[in-house]
Image: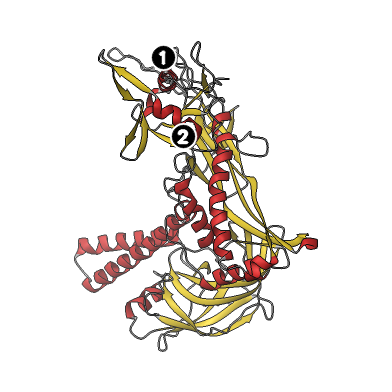
């Protein structure tokens, strides 16, 4: 269910019946993740079959309604109705009359829509409920608005925040004068009530203003060639769908939408040939594939709300002169001595969403007669998402696809040992991989290897003393296998034994991935028309690359990296 929020404009109110005329919706465009949404108010566009609408508090459908919205009509490009509050909601009615509660939100379901250059028009939609909320968006509608959006009387107007601050200040000054004289106690009490009322309204303004701001985003000012470059957002700490795209809140499940989607997998798709997968189902597919993946659970994951995203990174990998992050260095100061200002270097990494697809064919007999086809297709999609995303995030070449971990800048390749035989591993290989990881990376780094290395790793051992005792190099830890105290993960996406990078030691927190919100499935009979085969495809958009521009040159010792791989042993 979609929602629109708009500000209440309090005018004449019928207190004896607790009713007020209201404009519930308009054709004002609202920004959605896939473009601007416009609700059509042409004849026949608005389905009013659920009238009268329940009036709720903040879309809380677990509590009883606080009133109803009745007499719904569409006129002048707006949906209008009469709000009638319950007789047991005295405090709520007082807050509405005083202007403390100022905003309404309508919940609705779009059943038909038409694509436009900037988004889409909902050509058929149904309002479900109306709620009293905190944050305004569509200021062209509200309680007691007339057709031309002007005030009923020439002298009537809303008090904005500045007006309220001025009125509060005047009331405080008048109360101070009365306090000096000690006279007119009745007026003193009236002023106290006015000040309390202004405080409540100002608090409501502050709540509305704070609701407009995403407190989890940051916008650092980064100068590059004397131009200001803006970076918005940050990596997700919660990599689930709800954590990345819904601020951690549980996704609303529309059972009718899910049933229609599942039916379309067997019965057909809309005339346009494709549709967006319902968000709860897309979230389930991506979240359930998350534990089976290697890269996405451990790297920086940036939610992408547009086709590209700029990610900031420090450009300071040369520490040979004792400077860090491109210019910071520690200095000691004598008493009253002036310090030397330092400037770090920042660079921008641009992630551009690359479109990837999963393709599968199925015969009409399997679709129509096969038991559990939907479950089989869902399982195949989840597994393919897991393996496919991991492969390109590990080994992508960057041309029309992500730049994978093994091909990103700053990766170090450790040469094989002198005289080392082909397709083999030795203890010295692993210790040298370990030694070239940058110091801070050891607490997060893991070994990633192809399963073909398992026989070699299981037979590697290190002699202890002169008595012939040995200890295995790869041991079984609490959470799986470990080498030198760090976890080992096996993936068939890695090159086979003997090839370059068949085993690597990597800190995946230095790798950035961007993931778009939308997930699409499309079905067609055209490719297999002559063979009675139905073709399915799932489309997902993402990108990725390492955040380092080159290897790290420390003040002392050999170069270091966030990703260290073993060279070829042919």
Q: Answer above or below: position of 399 versus 534.
A: above
Q: Secondary structure at mark 2?
A: helix
Quadrant the C terminus occupies? top right
Rendered location of residue 108, percent (x, y): 55, 73
Which residue is farthest left?
182
Q: Nearer the viewer, residue 279 or 313?
A: 279
Rendered location of residue 233, percent (x, y): 49, 44
Q: Nearer the viewer, residue 113 or 94?
A: 113
Tag nearer the camera, 1 or 2: 2
Q: Answer above or below: position of 565 versus 123.
A: above
Q: How many marks?
A: 2
Judge from the rendering whether residue 283 lies leftward or rightward of residue 101; answer left or right. right
Q: Answer above or below: position of 31 versus 79.
A: above
Identify the residue at image location x=56%, y=21%: 568
Asked if residue 400 can be seen in this view, the reply is yes
Rendered location of residue 541, percent (x, y): 61, 48
Q: Which numbered dot is residue 508?
A: 2
Judge from the rendering whether residue 83 lies leftward or rightward of residue 80; answer left or right. left
Q: Nearer the viewer, residue 357 or 183?
A: 357
- Label 1 and label 2: CA atoms lie apart by 26 Å
Q: Secondary structure at mark 1?
A: loop
Of marks 1 and 2, which one's residue comes earlier in the chain? Answer: 1
Q: Which numbered dot is residue 330?
A: none
Rendered location of residue 16, percent (x, y): 40, 89
Identify the residue at image location x=27%, y=14%: 335
Judge from the rendering whether residue 180 lies leftward or rightward of residue 191; answer left or right. left
Which residue is farthest bottom?
16
Which residue is farthest right?
530
Asked if residue 154 can be seen in this view, the reply is no
Q: Residues within 10 Å of mark 1 (few under 14, many from 20)?
A: few
Find disc 1 in the rendering and name its residue.
Answer: 322
């Amino acid at each position: 269910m979609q929602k629109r929020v708009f500000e209440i404009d309090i005018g004449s109110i019928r207190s004896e019946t607790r009713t007020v005329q209201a404009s519930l919706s308009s054709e004002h465009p609202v920004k959605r993740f896939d473009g601007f949404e416009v609700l059509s108010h042409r004849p026949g566009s608005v389905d009013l079959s659920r009238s009268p609408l329940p009036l709720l508090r903040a879309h809380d459908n677990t509590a009883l309604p606080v009133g109803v919205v009745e007499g719904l009509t569409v006129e002048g490009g707006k949906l209008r109705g009469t709000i009638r509050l319950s007789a047991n909601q005295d405090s709520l009615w007082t807050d509405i009359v005083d202007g403390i509660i100022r905003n309404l939100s309508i919940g609705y379901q779009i059943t038909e829509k038409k694509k436009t250059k900037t988004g889409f028009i909902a050509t058929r939609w149904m309002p479900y409920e109306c709620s009293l909320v905190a944050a305004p968006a569509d200021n062209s509608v509200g309680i007691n608005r007339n057709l031309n959006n002007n005030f009923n009387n020439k002298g009537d107007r809303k008090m904005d925040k500045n007006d309220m601050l001025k009125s509060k200040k005047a009331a405080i000054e008048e109360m101070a004068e009365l306090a000096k004289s000690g006279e007119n106690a009745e007026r003193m009490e009236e002023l106290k009530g006015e000040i309390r009322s202004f405080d409540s309204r100002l608090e409501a303004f502050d709540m509305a203003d704070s609701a407009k701001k995403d407190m989890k985003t940051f916008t650092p000012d980064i100068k590059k060639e004397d131009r200001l470059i803006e970076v918005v957002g940050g990596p997700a700490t919660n990599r689930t769908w709800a954590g990345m795209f819904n601020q951690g809140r549980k996704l609303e499940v529309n059972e009718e939408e899910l049933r229609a989607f599942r039916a379309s997998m067997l019965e057909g798709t809309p005339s346009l040939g494709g549709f967006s997968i319902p968000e709860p189902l897309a979230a389930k597919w991506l979240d359930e594939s998350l534990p089976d993946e290697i890269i996405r659970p451990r790297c920086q994951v940036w939610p992408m709300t547009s086709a590209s995203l700029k990610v900031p990174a420090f450009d300071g990998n040369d520490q040979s002169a004792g400077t860090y992050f491109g210019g910071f260095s520690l200095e000691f100061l004598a008493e009253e001595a002036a310090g030397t200002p330092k400037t770090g270097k920042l660079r921008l990494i641009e992630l551009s969403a690359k479109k990837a697809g999963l393709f599968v064919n199925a015969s009409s007999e399997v679709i129509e007669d096969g038991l559990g086809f939907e479950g089989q297709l869902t399982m195949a999609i989840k597994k393919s998402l897991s393996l496919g995303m991991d492969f390109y995030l590990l080994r992508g070449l960057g041309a029309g696809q992500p730049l994978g971990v093994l091909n990103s800048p700053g990766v170090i390749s450790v040469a094989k040992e002198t005289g080392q035989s082909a397709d083999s591993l030795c203890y010295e290989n692993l210790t040298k991989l370990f030694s070239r990881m940058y110091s801070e990376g050891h607490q997060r780094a893991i070994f990633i290897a192809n399963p073909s290395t398992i026989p070699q790793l299981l037979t590697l051992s290190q002699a202890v003393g002169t008595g012939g005792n040995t200890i295995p190099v790869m041991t079984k830890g609490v959470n799986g296998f470990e080498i030198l105290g760090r976890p080992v993960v096996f993936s068939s996406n890695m090159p086979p034994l003997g090839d370059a990078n068949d085993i690597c030691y990597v800190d995946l927190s230095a790798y950035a991935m961007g993931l778009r919100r939308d997930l699409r499935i499309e079905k067609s009979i055209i490719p297999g028309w002559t063979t009675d085969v139905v073709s399915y495809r799932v489309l997902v958009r993402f990108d990725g690359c390492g955040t380092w521009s080159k290897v790290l040159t420390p003040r002392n010792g050999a170069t270091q990296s966030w990703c260290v791989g073993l060279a070829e042993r042919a």
